[in-house]
Every structure is written in C-alpha cells, then in structure tokens.
Image: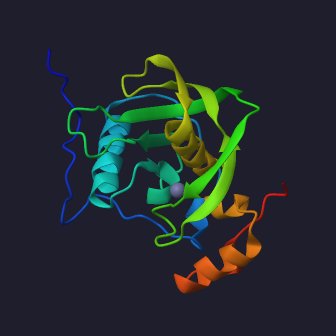
Amino acid sequence: MTATLPVEKKKLKHPPLDIHTLGDKVLRQPAKRVAKVDSSMRDLAYDMLKTMYSSDGIGLAAPQVAVNKQLIVVDIDPENAAAPPLILMNPKIIRASKEVCTDKEGCLSIPGVYLDVVRPSAIEVSFKDENGRPQKLQAADLLARCILHEMDHLTGVMFVDRVDNQLALNQELQKNGFSAGDVKAIAG
Ligand SMILES: [Zn+2]
C-alpha cells in the first residue's frame, strides 16, 4: 500500500501563503473553532503545509497566515517524503505530563530567534482530521513540543512569551530586528 500524501514536501519559489511576523496583530487574536471541515478547510491546510515546507518549518498555525481558525499543521520529519504530516483542527489537550523538559524553539513568525522554552514532555491531544473525523494522539518530546507551540498560536500566545531568560530574549530579538515590546510575558 502506498500512502498518498496531500502535498509534496518541497520548496516552492512562490509559496501560496504569507507568514506574518511578531508585532503583527493577527498573531495575537484567539482563533475560532472550525465549525465544519470542508474542502475549503482542507485546501487551507494543504496551502499551509506547502508554505511550511517552503520555509523549512516543522509546524504552522492558521493565525500565522492571518486566518482566524483553530487549525494547525505539523511535520517533525520533513526530510522523509513518505511520512505523512499531521493536520489538526480544533485541537484540545486532554492530558499533559507533570514532567517537563526544556529545549530550544524557533518560529516561522520570529525568524532567526531560537530560545529555550519549558514544556510538558508528553501530551495527549484530541482533534478533528482533514476529513472531519475525531482523532486522539499521544505525543512526546519534539512532537509534543511542536503541537503545544502551534496550539499556543491559536490563543494568540507566541513562544517568546514563555521564555524565562530575559537577557537572552532581549538580545536575540534585537539581533533579529524584533521589538521586546511585542512580547507578552506569561507569568511563570
Ligand atoms: Zn510559531
């Protein structure tokens, strides 16, 4: 059996969507639930994947392309042409481990900035797939981190809001042309 992938994992010279960057208001608005999974939502998910692969990302959330919907796409194995990506609509965390881990994160909306973020090591998430079918997924390590990062976008949270090391944060933002004033620190 050959799995048919919705989109080819390749870089396009002209990706279908524009990615908004830190400081842009669209990134700070809470996204609305997807009421109906139809072909327009599927096409949006596929365009998001094409845009993500074109930018060397491993995840993208709809608010990053200025769409106010609870939709994220994730692929932690972008070099593997045979591994299908994940498309999650209305994702919800059912369980998160007490155990946490720290790792560097980046974001296509804050290019060049990579900083340590603490997240639960493992999660269970429920969502609807691109065919509207309810699904559950257990994820750990990088996959859990990536899903949590993308889900943060759905509530208007950026990963830099979760960075503890203020000195490193300010340095990295400044170096890459972003303003520390656009960070909304989450009290930890
Ligand atoms: Zn991001």
- Residue 13 percent location from the top left of the image: 18, 66
Which image quarter is the N terminus in? Answer: top left
Q: Which residue appears at 62% of the width and 31% of the height?
A: 122
Residue 158 showing in the rendered view: no
Residue that lies at the very extreme toward the top in this rendered image? 1
- Residue 18 percent location from the top left of the image: 37, 64
Residue 166 showing in the rendered view: yes
Colour mapping:
rainbow
Q: Is residue 115 above or below residue 85?
A: below
Q: Which residue appears at 21% of the width and 58% of the height?
A: 11
Residue that lies at the very extreme toward the left in this rendered image? 1
Q: Residue 173 or 50: which is nearer the viewer?
A: 173
Q: Is residue 69 above or below residue 171?
A: above
Q: Is residue 77 above or below residue 19?
A: above
Q: Residue 70 or 93: which is nearer the viewer?
A: 93
On the picture, is 52 further left or further right than 101?
left
Q: How many numbered tags mark residues here?
A: 0
On the picture, is 20 further left or further right than 97?
left
Q: Residue 29 or 88: which is nearer the viewer?
A: 88
- Residue 29 percent location from the top left of the image: 64, 56
On the picture, is 161 further left or further right than 105?
right
- Residue 173 percent location from the top left of the image: 60, 78
Q: Which residue appears at 71% of the width and 40% of the height?
A: 100
Which image quarter is the C terminus in? Answer: bottom right
Residue that lies at the very extreme toward the right in this rendered image? 187
Q: Residue 83 or 4: which is nearer the viewer?
A: 83
**Toward which corner of the image does residue 51 lie, by quadrant?**
bottom left
